[in-house]
Image (spheres, rainbow, N blue to C red):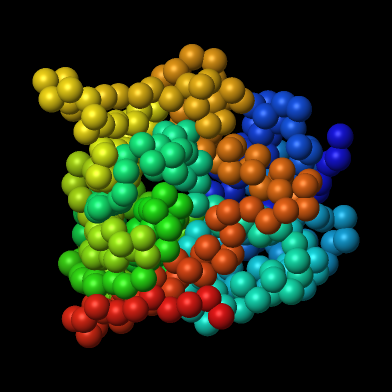
Amino acid sequence: MKTYNVGLIGAGFMAKAHSIAYSGMPIFFWPAPALVTKKVIADLTQERADAAAAQFGFERGTDNWRSVIEDPNIDIIDICTPNNAHAEIAIAAAEAGKHILCEKPISRTIEEAHKMYHAVKKAGTVNMLAFNYRMTPAVQLAKKYIDEGAIGDILDFRGTYLQDWSADPNSPLSWRFQKEICGSGAFGDIATHVVDMLRFLLGDFTEVNARMATYINERPIQTGVADSLGNVKGGSDAPKKKVDVDDQCFLALKCKNGAFGSIEATRNAWGRNNYITFEIHGTKGSIYFNYERRDELQVCFASDPGDRRGFRTVYTGPAHPFGEALWPIPALGIGYTETKIVEMYKFIKAITEGKQVSPSFEDGYNIELIGEAAFKSAASGLWEKVGKVE
Ligand code: SOE
């Protein structure tokens, strides 16, 4: 069986998820399309890289990410850094002819997304963006219902991504609140996941009318490099710095297929943890998904007799997309890890078969274009057209 060597850059929370996925992919998907050897992990210091290598199962650590890209034995570059490093690393990796898996969002700006897209297009290597939630079997099942016409023509949709890890004004100012590093706040960090899922389910968006708001205008400066994702340590007397990204975004969207709907996101919604939902209404029925109950898909069919009509719950299992490879009984439980393992399976399969996979850098660029139109609309107050990949 073919084995690919991976070099992973950035040793935080996402590196943990990707590392488990490299190991878990052949355990679930056997025979695997190929195996992956965790060769080298890079981080800002040698000490952190060595610690991550030991914890995540890499052969070695390095503080020099360029050496990973220059290494001819490395086939795959996996980018798990904050957003400000995506473009530089991805472009260098593409120029070195590597396959690339990159964490979302694609970049901080349209200019970066444009360059990244053209670099991978020129390289002709497999490129993937880690929008993992669409890999959830229930989301894939929703796609099946829609494509089969089971809920008819799509009329409208609403999507949410609500979390509360930054609702406390004393939760630290990590890179996720600094425009220079992240590009945008709630939009890039979490709304993009819902945009990806709804694009996957419904197709392209053409116009957007958006509102963006920042409620917590300054936060205590984070100590240390690791992102604590809001875990408050210390009091409010720590020195503070300005937040220059959106806390909350609300997008009204028009879809190419004629449907109309909304997407909203915030990381300040007390009581909501990873509340990723969508509800889609069609002429023949409706579909509802909530990631916090990710083994379930709720469906309602207009054709059911009036006295029985209502949402029914389908628990995903072996009969559903990726189900045979996952667990043998419905509702044994899909977790975050499984979504990452399915993502990894699709990525490695695409490399083995020499085919491009979705979500690709092109998808990421499209989502960045939706963001560009949304921020433009928030400033103008008008409907703005979504630009084209060029
Ligand atoms: C923080 O909001 C975060 O870690 C996101 O960056 C991830 O993409 C999301 O899946 C979990 O929450």
Give above or below for 232 relative to 337: below
Q: Give the farthest residue toward the top.
A: 329
Residue at 59 percent of width and 64 percent of height: 361
Residue 157 x, y percent position in the rendering? 26, 52
Q: Quadrant of residue 189?
A: bottom left
Residue 285 x, y percent position in the rendering? 26, 38
Look at the image and tell me whether residue 166 can be seen.
no
Residue at 71 percent of width and 48 percent of height: 350
Give above or below for 131 relative to 321: below
Front-most of residues 143 and 134: 143
Give above or below for 266 relative to 217: above
Residue at 51 percent of width and 70 percent of height: 365
Give above or below for 236 relative to 304: below
Front-most of residues 174 and 368: 368
Residue at 20 percent of width and 41 percent of height: 271
Q: In which quarter of the image is the C terminus?
A: bottom right
Look at the image and tell me whether residue 57 can be seen.
yes
Q: Give the farthest residue toward the left.
A: 307
Image check: 20 left or right of 110?
right
Residue 129 x, y percent position in the rendering? 56, 57
Q: Quadrant of residue 183?
A: bottom left
Residue 333 x, y percent position in the rendering? 44, 23
Front-most of residues 194 and 190: 194
Q: Give the farthest residue toward the bottom.
A: 380
Front-most of residues 50 and 102: 102
Total number of numbered discs in the rendering: 0
